[in-house]
Amino acid sequence: MRKKLHAVERDAGGLFVTLTYHEDHPAPGECKRHLEVFWKRLQRRFPDISAVWKMEPQERGVPHFHLMIFGIDFIPVQWLSKQWNDVVGDTDTHRKSGVELEPFVNQDGKLQGYMAKYMGKEYDTWPGVEEGDEWAEMGRWWGCLNRDQIPYAEWDDARIYLDQGEAIQLISDLLDEWGVTIADGVIPPSLTINTRGDPLDRLDSLMARL
């Protein structure tokens, strides 16, 4: 999940949505069916949107969903709440509190870095459940929706040529840092580094080592 969020354009904005259950404690498969139906309703009205979602436990153990929705900067919260309420069948009281909606602006990737950390917590099993419980094998707990529309950043190339001594020093340092073992005395003649964000920023940090 962290890799997916870090790969998003550094100025991509959208909406952060939280969907909660109040009266129900559904099974894992039922939760995901609710999310699927809810998303189909959104996509029928807003066909170009996309999202990264995560399912996680509330303090009382009931699941809720977080979604980072891209491709739109406004959805009426009353309409959004009605869709979720209709899907899960909760009460009208829940309609007011079952959906939280906040716009986000991603400035130079700072938000996606925060959200990658916030949403990136992993679960081997659902907290507090015992073996044999249906939540002990909850399946996938995150994913992408309409992934072809997610605003992934494009790669840019930043090429630099060094003299032999500088190249050997820098490549050797990086191989040691990455824990890559090669035969003694063998130094690759070139090295390609894939990096998120502005490659020139990464390049500047590398050149500062020389």
Image (spheres, rainbow, N blue to C red):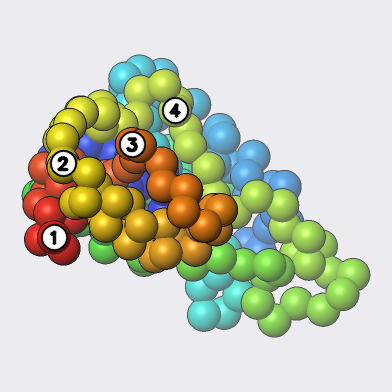
179 w.r.t. 65: above or below: below
Q: Residue 78 location in percent, x, y?
A: 28, 44
Residue 52 circle label = none
Disc 3 target residue: 190
Q: Nearer the viewer, mark 4 or mark 1?
A: 1
Among numbered discs 3 and 1, the one appearing first in the sequence: 3
Residue 210 circle label = 1
Among numbered discs 1 and 2, the one appearing first in the sequence: 2
Q: Is residue 48 left or right of residue 23?
A: left
- Residue density around tag 4, few if under 14, some if 14–19, many if 20 or more, within 10 Å: few
Which element is circle 1 on?
loop
Which element is circle 3 on?
loop
Q: Residue 163 versus residue 18: which sits nearer the camera?
A: 163
Q: Residue 153 versus residue 192: which sits nearer the camera?
A: 192
Task: Check disc 2 and give the amino acid type.
Answer: Leu
User: Whole-Å distance between the Cαs marked 2 and 4?
Assistant: 39 Å
Among numbered discs 2 and 3, the one appearing first in the sequence: 2
Disc 4 target residue: 147
Q: Are marks 1 and 2 in contact (CB under 8 Å)?
A: yes
Q: Residue 206 versus residue 195: which sits nearer the camera?
A: 206
Residue at x 29% of width, y 51% of height: 168
Q: Nearer the viewer, mark 2 or mark 4?
A: 2
User: Whole-Å distance between the Cαs marked 1 and 2?
Assistant: 10 Å
Q: Residue 31 location in percent, x, y?
A: 63, 50
Which element is circle 2 on?
loop
Q: Is residue 78 left or right of residue 138?
A: left
Q: Residue furthest front?
A: 185
Q: Quadrant of residue 69?
A: top left
Disc 2 target residue: 162
